[in-house]
Image: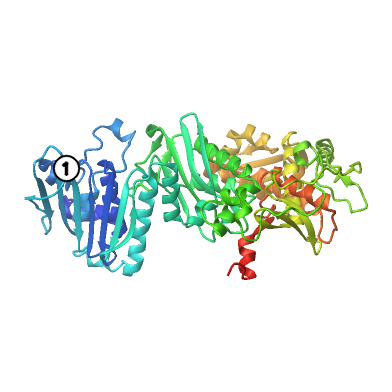
Amino acid sequence: MPHIQLLSPRLANQIAAGEVVERPASVVKELVENALDAGASRVDIEVEQGGVKLIRVRDDGSGIDEADLPLALSRHATSKILTLDDLEAVGTLGFRGEALASISSVSRLALTSRTEAQEAAARVEVEGRDMDARLSPAAHPVGTTVEVRDLFFNTPARRKFLRTEKTEFNHVEECIRRQALSRFDAGFTLRHNQRVVQSLRPAESEVDKERRIGSLCGQQFIDNAVIIDAEATGLRLWGWVALPTFSRSQADLQYFFVNGRVIRDKLVAHAVRQAYRDVLYNNRHPAFVLYLEVEPATVDVNVHPTKHEVRFRDGRLVHDFIFRTLHRALADVRPDDHLRGAVAQSFGREPEAVVANPAGHPAGMGASLPDQAPPVAGGYANGGGFGVGSASQPQQEWKASDQMAFYQSLNEGGGGASRPDHASQPVAVTPPRDTDEEPPLGYAIAQLHGIYILAQSRAGLIVVDMHAAHERITYERMKHALAEQDLKSQPLLVPLSLAVSQKEAALAETHGEELQHLGLQIERIGPETLAVRQIPALLRGADTEQLVRDVLADLIEHGQSDRVEAVTHELLGTMACHGSVRANRQLTIPEMNSLLRDMEATERSGQCNHGRPTWTLVTLSELDKLFLRGR
């Protein structure tokens, strides 16, 4: 076996570069983070040939003292941490002291800098086998410029792994997008082959921040996003989450920042997926730009050299906080939130003004509504409900007491219960005037093929999928009724024996009380054997073994499980689907209006239980285009 010997500094740096410098975008990321850590208010990035030929990053930060310039290119040299306590509470983006040394080992690097205390700037260059730093005077304002030329010129094997110029620049552009989203107080300019691609001024006001979000993530995202801002003990989550109707075919518009650092984290991803669980269509992905602020000492950023991963001291607390905040925000979404996005895309950037002042529209958006019956008194908000009776039959309601009886019969194994037959007669009131405040979904005017409800509002024509809308309303009421009572368990006639790993068996034993709360009674009867004695009564027809294994897998990966709740809600969704008004049912105008009012008061009413939209808006502007009006 060969003798053990020390690696040369250059080879050691090139090994480190294999972790830090993957492609030109990795270099840009490290240099921009250094600029932001130096307090820069403006960062200019210039690249050529996708960053392979040249990467130049210039900032107006505090600069580097001339005496420190050679040391700045040494490995494990940094001004950001000094002791272990500093490492355990990192407040800067960079801290490892490896980036500049790693980059200089695989490129021709020049660093020019000047501090406010210096009369002149200095320049340090590194190139060659021994990586000797050459220091010389230079002209430069306060701040720093780093030039990286001919990336991987001395490691041709690494250079072969690079993609096309366009692909590499797309990665650079994505890197700048993330940095610009993380720091609204800094301005950014990006040039590629002498062409300005992005120019962003500092964004201080909320309007400027939304304008930057719109330019980086697309105006449609900001038009269809809900602003959230929530705080708990030592935690704050704020930002923008898109409405479920603005979902994506891939997870390409998801930005999550922890103390200003963009991260990819399984815990965060799971909390977001859980919050969007029953409002997204199959295989669709939510869009969001979210910022989590925590005490630096409660999050470990020294997990991976790229610093894309973090580890929370109390992961379960963070997971629950993110889930609860997003779940509540999505539950509070109402039709008027959807309307703002739809109208904005049709009329421009000020949808509220268009809806509130429709008189200026050439088609007469403020015209009088037809002489029709207004919504039925006693809708969802007043304890009533949408009626499924025919035009000749009085409207029926399903009260909370009836729902409780329904679930009582299920939990006792008595099967389903039919809907009660007591009713309330629709009450007619005076039709609204033009000056009256109009509900978001307007007023029903007709029914199309027994499937869709057509409603008129000042914004235009609203088309409602009757069955999908009622399905969501019924589903939410069922969930509410179930939440008001404990989830009852049903003993198994013959306990189910499961062979598991020792880790899973120990986990089930440790989380016994939590599993009992979920309606599962599981006992450890051997080192690698579990006995399932009770399951939730609602899930007596489910695959018990698979359910328990999924719950244990969730506990191993996330420290908790919502599997029972997910399966329970899936069952409720099926029941709501079968219990909702069917197609071809003819409804009266009051019944249609009652459904519209229920939708406005029901959580997540913009989507059915399967994630499909329940209604859509066709603005008068869009109708005008169809008939070439105003041309």
Residue 180 shows in this picture? yes
The answer to which quarter of the image holds residue 119 is top left
Residue at 54% x, 58% y is 248
Q: Where in the figure is residue 187, as x and y percent of width and height?
A: 32, 48
Q: Quadrant of the N terminus?
A: bottom left
Query: Between residues 402 and 228, which one lies in front from this camera angle?
Result: 228
Q: Where in the figure is residue 45, as x and y percent of width and height?
A: 27, 56
Q: Residue furthest right?
A: 392
**Residue at numbered disc 1:** 64
In this figure, which colouring scheme has been used for the structure? rainbow
Q: Is residue 60 above or below residue 584?
A: above
Left or right position of 106 against 182: left
Query: Between residues 316 and 227, which one lies in front from this camera angle?
Result: 227
Count the numbered circles shown.
Answer: 1
Three-letter amino acid code at the position of disc 1: Ile
Q: Is residue 535 above or below residue 195?
A: above
Q: Residues within 10 Å of mark 1 (few under 14, many from 20)?
A: many
Left or right position of 257 against 37: right
Residue at 16% x, 42% y is 64
Q: Residue furthest left?
A: 136
Query: Between residues 240 and 263, which one lies in front from this camera angle?
Result: 240
Q: Under tag 1, what secondary structure?
A: loop
Q: Where in the figure is residue 79, as x and y percent of width and height?
A: 21, 38
Q: Where in the figure is residue 487, as x and y percent of width and height?
A: 73, 36
Query: Between residues 106 and 625, which one lies in front from this camera angle?
Result: 625
Q: Quadrant of the C terminus?
A: bottom right
Residue at 65% x, 70% y is 627
Residue 95 shows in this picture? no
The answer to which quarter of the image holds residue 327 is top right
